[in-house]
Every structure is written in C-alpha cells, then in structure tokens.
Image (cartoon, rainbow, N blue to C red):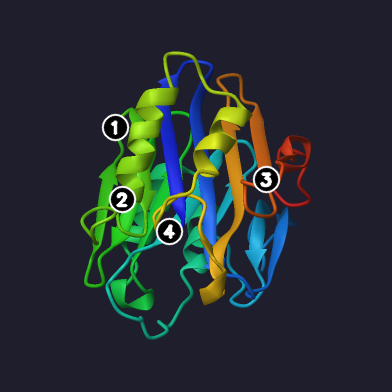
C-alpha cells in the first residue's frame, strides 16, 4: 500500500520533511539505500527494487526528493509497459521540481499502472497522480499531507484519517524528532492493512522498510532508514552518505 507523509513549509528550520513506509511482497528482493545511477544519468541516493530495477523513493543530493505510492483500483492490475519505480528515476533525472513534474505529466498515462508521485524540494512540493486514464498534477499547499494507495478518492481507507488524527495529536508547533516519526509510522490497526505498519504475513505482504528524509533551511540533508518494519527496526542515520560527494554531477 505504502505511505507518504509530506511536511512542506511547516517548520522554518526544516522546509521539507517526508516520512515514508514501503509495503510490498515480503519475498520481493531489494537493496538498501546507496548511490547508483540508471544508464548515464546523474547519480541518486535511493534503495533499489532488484526485480524491476527502479525505486520507491530517493534524493538527488540535498536538493530534490521524489517518492511514489501505488494507486488502488479494486482489482489486480496487469503489468504495464514500464515499472512505476522508473518514474522516480525519471523525476530525479530532471533535476528540479517543476521540470520533473512536467516530465512525468507529459508521459503517456498508459505506460504505467496508477500511482501517486511526490516531487519536492525546500521551496515547493508537487503531486502527479495517474488514475488509470490520465495524469493529474497539483502543487501541494504548505502544510502536512498524507498519501497512500487509496488517497485522492481511489478507495475508502482508515489509514489516511488515522495518520491525520495522530499528526494533529502529536505534532505541535515544534518539529518532531525521529522518535516521534517512528512512533507514527510504527502504529498498527485492528485491520492489519489499515495501519501505517502493515503485518500481513499470511499473505506474504507487509511493511518492508521505513524512511525519514529531512531537508533543512541551511542546505543540509537528513536521511534515516529502517531496513525492516519500524515497529521492530531502528533507523540508521545515512545522512552523510546521502549528502556525500557523487561520482557524477
């Protein structure tokens, strides 16, 4: 299902914070975040789907974040010509927010199964989403935004409302620290598919990893990654690696 919580222009010291869980088949192979590049494009820092070759989120230096969720359609989708994970690479390759949003919006909607794609930097955040027939593009207003597989009218969901309640209860004027973000992303629900942290082992499915990305007002980047469910896995601080020197511009 996947979850993205996007805080854009909420805290002066951190104009962009994204907290994300990846939900996927437990057996699907993946590599943890590292520097890599598709073909001759600029390097990014991102995990990698080892089956289809794309990724579900990543950063290009300390300047651009892109993350994706699937979009629910109530039925099993036949494979599209391209993996949705390629869209994250397409957007990061564009180099900046508006160019990335324009690049994705201009693609043939039939190339990918439905999705929600967040493209953001310190100044602005955009959402491009595909409903199965066309692309929609909107600029996210300053504030907190919750996106999951069932957002933007895709299907009824308790998860989005639960996260919004928790954000209202726990997040005040002060920026939360990593423990608060972890508590948010580690919460379970009675229906295992409706909590941010999904446990559906009987279906071979669940939350595979969790990531918090923070871009501060001074140009710094925080990148924290739990290579497992956040309810039982500590975040590793990968900020130095994420913001480190790249071998390609």
Label annotation for residue 141: 1
Separation of disc 1 and disc 2 at Cα?
23 Å
**Mark 4 vs mark 2: which is more N-terminal?**
4
- Whether the residues at callouts 3 and 2 have beta carbons within 8 Å, the answer is no
Q: Nearer the viewer, residue 37 or 56?
A: 56
* Comparing labels 3 and 2, the label whose residue is closer to the camera: 2
Quadrant in which residue 46 is drawn: bottom right
Query: Tag 4, which secondary structure?
Result: strand
- Residue topped by disc 2: 158
* Comparing labels 1 and 2, the label whose residue is closer to the camera: 2
| Image x and y of residue 171, in percent | 44, 23
Residue at 27%, 74% in the rendered image: 74
Q: Is residue 82 above or below residue 93?
A: below
- Residue topped by disc 4: 69
**Mark 1 vs mark 2: which is more N-terminal?**
1
- Whether the residues at callouts 3 and 4 have beta carbons within 8 Å, the answer is no
Q: Is residue 224 above or below residue 93?
A: above
| Image x and y of residue 104, in percent | 38, 60
Residue at 34%, 36% in the rendered image: 164
Separation of disc 1 and disc 3 at Cα?
26 Å
- Residue topped by disc 3: 225
Separation of disc 3 and disc 2 at Cα?
25 Å
């Amino acid at each position: 299902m996947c979850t993205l919580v996007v805080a854009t222009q909420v805290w002066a010291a951190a104009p962009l914070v994204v907290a994300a869980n990846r939900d996927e088949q437990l057996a699907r192979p993946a590599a943890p975040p590292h520097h890599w590049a598709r073909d001759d494009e600029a390097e990014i820092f991102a995990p990698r789907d080892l089956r289809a070759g794309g990724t579900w989120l990543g950063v290009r230096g300390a300047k651009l974040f892109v993350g994706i969720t699937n979009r629910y359609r109530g039925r099993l989708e036949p494979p599209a010509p391209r993996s949705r994970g390629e869209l994250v690479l397409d957007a990061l390759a564009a180099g900046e927010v508006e160019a990335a949003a324009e690049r994705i919006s201009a693609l043939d909607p039939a190339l990918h199964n439905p999705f929600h794609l967040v493209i953001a930097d310190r100044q602005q955040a955009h959402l491009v989403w595909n409903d199965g027939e066309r692309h929609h593009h909107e600029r996210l207003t300053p504030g907190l935004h919750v996106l999951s597989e069932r957002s933007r009218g895709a299907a009824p969901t308790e998860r989005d409302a639960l996260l919004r309640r928790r954000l209202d209860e726990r997040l005040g004027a002060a920026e939360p620290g990593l423990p608060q973000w972890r508590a948010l992303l580690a919460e379970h629900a009675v229906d295992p598919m409706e909590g941010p942290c999904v446990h559906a082992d009987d279906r071979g499915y669940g939350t595979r990893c969790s990531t918090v990305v923070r871009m501060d007002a001074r140009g710094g980047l925080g990148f924290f990654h739990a290579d497992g469910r956040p309810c039982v896995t500590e975040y590793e601080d990968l900020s130095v690696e994420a913001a480190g020197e790249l071998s390609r511009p």
